[in-house]
Amino acid sequence: MADPSTCPPLTRASVLAAHAAIKPLIHRTPVATSTTLSAFASAPQRDDELEGASGKTEAKPPAAKPTMRLFFKCENQQRVGAFKARGAFHALSRLSDEQLARGVVTHSSGNHAAALSLAARTRHIPAYIVMPSISTPSKIAATRGYGARIRFSGSTAPEREAVVRDVIAETGALLVPPYDHPDIVLGQGTLAVEFEEDVASMVKGEGGVGARGAYGRRGGKGLDAVIAPCGGGGMLSGIATALGGTGIRVFGAEPSFQGADDARRGLLSGSRIPAVSSLTIADGVRTPVGEIPWSVISDPEKVKGIFAVSEEEIKKALRLLMERMKVFVEPTAALGLAVALYNEEFRRLVEREAGEEGWNVGVVLSGGNTTMEALAKLYGPAE
Amino acid sequence: MADPSTCPPLTRASVLAAHAAIKPLIHRTPVATSTTLSAFASAPQRDDELEGASGKTEAKPPAAKPTMRLFFKCENQQRVGAFKARGAFHALSRLSDEQLARGVVTHSSGNHAAALSLAARTRHIPAYIVMPSISTPSKIAATRGYGARIRFSGSTAPEREAVVRDVIAETGALLVPPYDHPDIVLGQGTLAVEFEEDVASMVKGEGGVGARGAYGRRGGKGLDAVIAPCGGGGMLSGIATALGGTGIRVFGAEPSFQGADDARRGLLSGSRIPAVSSLTIADGVRTPVGEIPWSVISDPEKVKGIFAVSEEEIKKALRLLMERMKVFVEPTAALGLAVALYNEEFRRLVEREAGEEGWNVGVVLSGGNTTMEALAKLYGPAE
């Protein structure tokens, strides 16, 4: 992968350049709206919901009543079913033919592996994916389906990294990490460029997917804020970089379960938390924030806040996205809506800062890669 | 409801008039495409799939290899989450103010009840929905949520019809049946008008939702065929009416389970089958075809064939729609794709008639009203 010291700076201009480079290779995913979910977000939470969230019953302040018009960026419709295609295509676009010829390698086995495999196949180069030999057969088959060459390893991080080193020694392949690299950050940020443009034309009444005239009354004003999931932080830092100077506020969403809210806790303690061990259902964000994303996320001018939600809240938001909005998404994609609907701290912030006029809030639906069996486990009678 | 003898004739012109009448009240739902699913439809079925379908292993003809480019009409994104909104809005548009003032009543408690309730609320008139007192609380709450006045009855058809008669005697409300009425047929047919127009502009490369240039190579040619689920037959007969004279072939899709393929069997025997008792997972089509829809469906000039699929095939198609296309739909909506992918009789027909050039096949995703719990039952470990 390109040496970080030779990478473009983390600026809006660099994201725009990244977007120009990858535009022919990715989908411009639709922006959807939902009158029902916007109404839910703009109504105060019921007392029982607030109790469920805090675990306390005594001395609550009245529930916040923010005004939010929600817009959803449907990256579940992106190639390989997740925003990760953006970063992978961008990373490869910055390599020389000579570098490309040796192939690429990664030790991630989720959406990033699929994205890297697709991007490599498009460039007719090999992608080596290192994954634990105990991975489920369906996951192995899916990764192979994208044309990747799979190398098996043990399950721990050191074991996987050792196999990556072997692959590099053997083939000269370049390591493309899932998030901790400027080219990945800039690539993921490209979704914000489209999101900003498309919402602006929707509120101007110029149409756009899902625009039904309901948002025309506020004239030319586009997005006021964006909420995106934060795992390794590649996407969140990319969005914040893309929207630098636009006045659009950027917020992160994390699960609170088993300490997966490492970015939120890192901001509180003043330093990045380097390790996370959580089995949150939002399996796309079980990782700690990387160093390069952290340099953006920890800047209060760039990211205005990180908010955490419970597993139950993620499940409730996921259900609403499916049953009400009819979009098929993975649990991680429900984080942003869960914050908008259930995090009182965020809701009070919107009530206070947006006032009666309210905000146009962009929610990033990060991906759609889950299975019927995984959903059956979440919502079946055993649960 | 309007006396059928005063209704417009079942012609394309009447559907176009219906579309003009309801256009401001309904969503123009998107048309989606999927390279992956088109590729699946255009590959021969594997031997094990064919065996599973026929239950036989001996002396099979080689698997058909039709060429199909699939287009999906996303009525799961329609108001109330199903195409039924079209018929309900159209039925009310044809009533006088005096008729409307008395309100409307129906004994269906699924998507039609929701659609009628919404249409009635929009006109500020009461909708009386007769439903069995043993209905699930969530279904009762959902129907109430659309503003309907619920009247409880026993579970059998005669018991429900008796309560409908009581409501009519008491209020003068007009009965709006779920499918067996010309105004309903014409209303449902409006989806085909949009489908035809939108695919035509997609293949011309004029854009459209989900169009990504992949369909431009065939010039100005639009849809060659449409497959739609067939229950009461309101939608299928409406589509066939709408597309009369266009040359676009119309096909129906039914479940074979417990005789739910009554339209297919009726065509074979030469007369409509008046009763069905099936618990197919495609719960939107558990009803027999109505008399008025049958007058269209039984005309071989209008509907070119009806094909049946197994419960397993519906489940496989539903999984593909969700996991691959990322659309959230109800099992009934998977019928058309199941026919395209798994019904060898249909696939041989396309291979034979479409030849190497293939067909642009429109598949109607009829609705998206299911729950996470219902899906967990279909795909959970107990199944």
Image (cartoon, coloured by chain):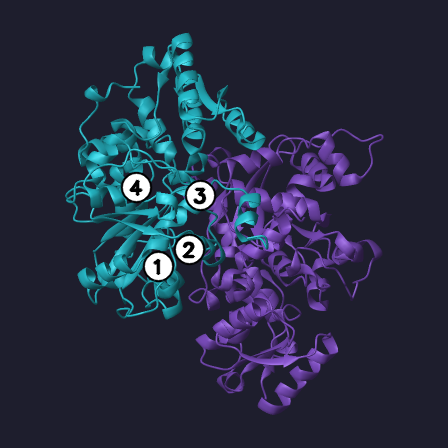
Chain colours: A cyan, B purple
Q: CA distance from mark 3 to mark 4?
A: 37 Å
Q: Residue at x 57, y 46 (%)?
A: B362
Q: Dots 1 and 2: beta carbons under 8 Å?
A: yes
Q: Residue at x 35, y 44 (%)?
A: A259
Q: Do the residues at pointers 3 and 2 share their chain?
A: no
Q: Dots 3 and 2: beta carbons under 8 Å?
A: no
Give the residue at mark 1.
A342
* Front one among B98 and A66: A66
Looking at the rendered structure, the secondary structure element under dot 2 is helix
Q: Which part of the image, by quadrant, shows the N terminus of chain A?
A: top left
Q: CA distance from mark 1 to mark 2?
A: 9 Å
Q: Chain of mark 4?
A: A
- Residue mark closest to the camera, 3 vs 4: 4
* Front one among B126 and B372: B372
Where residue B55 appears, x then y in whole percent?
Answer: 81, 39
Q: Chain of mark 3?
A: B
Residue A284, above or below B129: above
Q: Chain of mark 2?
A: A
What label sits on residue A198 in the rendered view?
none
Q: CA distance from mark 4 to mark 2?
A: 21 Å
* Disc 2 crowd, CA 10 A, few/some/many (<14, 14-19, 20+): many
Three-letter residue code for mark 2: Ala
Q: Is residue A32 left or right of residue B280?
A: left
Give the residue at mark 3.
B210
